[in-house]
Image (tube, rainbow, N blue to C red):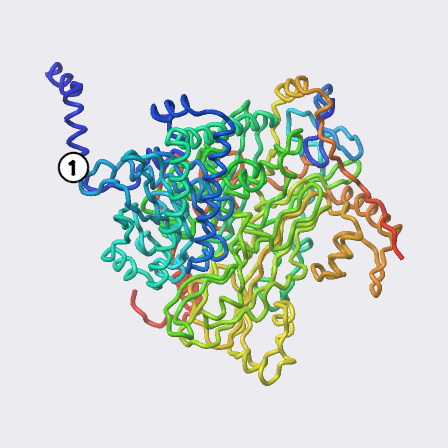
Amino acid sequence: MNEMSTRAKTPTLEEMNLIKKFLDDTTLFLGPDPEIMQNHDLMPRTEIEDAAIGKVSDAHTVAKIRDRIQSGCDEGYEMVEQMGAAPGAKWGDVITGVYSASGDLAIASAGGVLIFSALVHHPIKFIIKNWMDDPTVGVKDGDGFIHNDSRYGNVHNTDQSMIIPIFHKGKLVCWVASTVHEGENGAIEPGGMPSMAESPSDEGLKMSPFKVVENYQIKRDILTFLQNSVREPKLQYEDMKVKLFACLRIKQRIEETLNSDGPEALMATLRLTMEQVRAEVKRRISEWPDMTVRSYIIQDSTLRENCVVKINCKLTKTGDRLIFDFRGSSPEFTNRATNTIVAGLKGMLAQVFLCYVWPDLPRGQAAFAPIEVITDPHSIVNCSYDAPNSQSLMSIFTGFTAGQHAVAKFLYSCPEKFTRVHAPTFNMINTFIWGGVSQHGETLGNLCADLNGMGAGATASRDGEHALAPIFATMADIGEQELNEEEVPFLQLVSKKMTRDAIAPGKYRGGQGYTMMVATKDSEQWGFMTTAQGAKIPPLQGLFGGYACGTYPLSKVKDVDVYDVLMNEPERFRHSIEEIMNEQPFEDADYSTHHMGMGFEISKRGELFMISQGAGAGYGDLLERDPENIIKDIEEGLISPEVAARLYKVVFDAATLAIDFDASEAARAEERQARIKRSVPYAEFVKGWNKPKPPAHLQYFGCWGDDVGTLYMGAPDITRRGDQPRPNYMMHPKDVRIAELEARLEAAGAMGDEKK
Amino acid sequence: MKIPMTEYLRIDLETEKWECRVCDHVIAPAGGNYKEGLLVHNRDPREIHPPIIDPDKYRFTFSPDPEWVRILEFCCPSCGTQVETEYAIPGHPPLWDMQVDVAALKAQWAARGPAALPDAGPVVMPERGHSH
């Protein structure tokens, strides 16, 4: 018996091949492939690439071809930005790129959302692995593939890619792709990023990579199905065409290179570009000090309810290895949309380097390829297939900030820098997502470009810039709200006005954010949502003694028609959230504040919804801030005189703002002494401060202190091991509220004889 | 050789100590947590990020919730310079944020030499601009 069972357990090679063939032939569902999705490094150099490099490796030829391909990508990018129908296209939420025959992104457009540069290679590798040799699909000249499901690659399923293979004399030489944040995708809420999603089935279209173009023509039957699945069918069609034609323009530029220099020169250029960037990244890392830096960023909501969600980051550099360790971060939420697949996190970490540390490197996948990332399985930064992820931005952005904060501490002592040492940039998409039926009768769903107006972090030698750019695209645009208003039935009554006192102080202060007030005007079927964290806890950390930003709520004024007010009593209107909420100038109106996770809400004509973009973090001790710059901030309406005087200890004349330098120096010296007096030695402090578990009054998720192996799940007595997944359900906020109210009724004896 | 590691901290490679760059105070062993040689203050975040809208009327005011987050302010015990801040959940142990491999740092700088030292440094009081 023993011999027989031993034989049964050890199949021969032939039997193994038979088993493999059986499994391959009978795969019921080609889901996301972990082998592809967990790997962000470059594919091995192929024999064809090796032979090509043997023929062409002259640096001048490679540089010439690289620049030509780069220009082609930029040309494609311009086409999409100019012709795309999605608001995202118009403000640069776009990328185009050329991928190697194996699917690695070698060269991307200089502008646009660089996170895509680290993430669109996954669906191409899926196509190569599964469709290339499949007789029912295949990959031919003239084909085009579409994709948007982030479980197969990319950030979230509001981003759609068009991917085309490039052949030369019948042989595949490379791929071209164009990606746009399209917005609408038929999800449970309009606009493509539902925070109400409780499972992937609530998130709208989930396109695994499939063929939608043959002979360079979009297949009308499939197109119609896609249009029928979203709220903006015309946009779906127009942008598929735009992306296809952008790809074809890049194809044209590649063919010019193929004709002038041959396929070997092209393939050698793509491969050498990636290999050289990868090698340069390792060289640059080796210049950093060997060190471990720890940081954490707190998310204060799931967008449905306020709670404390930890993003834990330990960054270790040894020699030329750099390892991001996110173990200890919150468990994934089984029924909340703020989870991300790990590739999304990696894509955002790539942005730390491409946008803020080494912006001189050619854009592409190679810049992050040698950097390692560790996470817990089924965590908020490495979620499972079954977890919703339509609001993954919340976790990839806070993960980005943890990384940006940690990296700055390595860079300070580095003799070789490519940018200034930089405090964290604001990281939340404080903007309005909107949807409904427009004044023209069109069904629409999308968002305002103000998400691109994030305040920049301060640097080692200057203040952060206001409302500069989103953290995922340093070369993007805020667009023209007035143009948008021709298409949508609401106005931004106040737009781009800096929010006074919403500050991040420091020796150099963070760039500030601006106020947005919107009100619906010409539709009875129109609403808004907001999807950001940071109304109770700042989503940043300051750098080297600087402070983070404050917090940013949503304010509403209901039971008012501000258009009537503006028509009949315009003097009542105020232009800041501060004045409207504190003075309450509209009689009988209802004034309220909320966290920034407002689910889609229908708005009546003239009701006000008010938010502010956020500030980047401050840098250095605020007592070192130049008094003249403080006065300039007062003059520019960034900070009130009272707050400036109290925080910065600068003394000035209230009427003329003339600085009394001697008095300021004395006040600052006094404050330094006061600090020493009110502070306590570290050892003494931690005795009173440190607690063994998270506080019971907070719903806390993630590790506590140094024990990264234990993840808390909403209460001090509910935990899981980091490496042992467990479901993590949240109650519906309305059920929570009902339970609270019922408990009060019961305590008051007012439940009557209701049976349970 | 003294290596500037942050805006206000350096490591003296000979003595293997963290030092304050503003007042030269010796803070802590370089292989350890520099915070252990600093003073700490548990700051109510509302003092730094003041409410913009009336906290008596509204739940959310642009000011962080002091029951949810505190600001740990770390300063030099000698000169009072604010070296670092940490936005922390109440009771969460402060982070050992920079754990340096001192032997590797020494070897790295022995190979580089002092000419490579970055020249950026703190300016405690800025020069007065002229005014009219």
- Asked whether the viewer can see residue A678, the reply is yes
- Camera-nearest residue between B101 and A142: A142
Residue designated by label 1: A26
Q: Could you tell me residue B26's position as x and y percent?
A: 76, 28
Q: Could you tell me residue A58's position as x and y percent?
A: 48, 25
Q: Quadrant of the N terminus of chain A?
A: top left
The quadrant in which residue A635 appears is bottom right
Q: Residues within 10 Å of mark 1 (few under 14, many from 20)?
A: few
Looking at the rendered structure, the secondary structure element under dot 1 is: loop
Q: Residue at x 54, y 69 (%)?
A: A492
- Asked whether the viewer can see residue A717, the reply is no
Horizontal placement of A375 versus B102: left or right? left
Q: Residue furthest front?
A: A260
Q: Could you tell me residue A751's position as x and y percent?
A: 37, 70
Up-down relation of residue B72 to residue A50 (above or below): below
Q: Chain of mark 1?
A: A
Q: Could you tell me residue A504's position as x and y percent?
A: 66, 51
- Camera-nearest residue between A263 and A47: A263
- Camera-nearest residue between A191 and A719: A191
Q: Quadrant of the C terminus of chain A?
A: bottom left
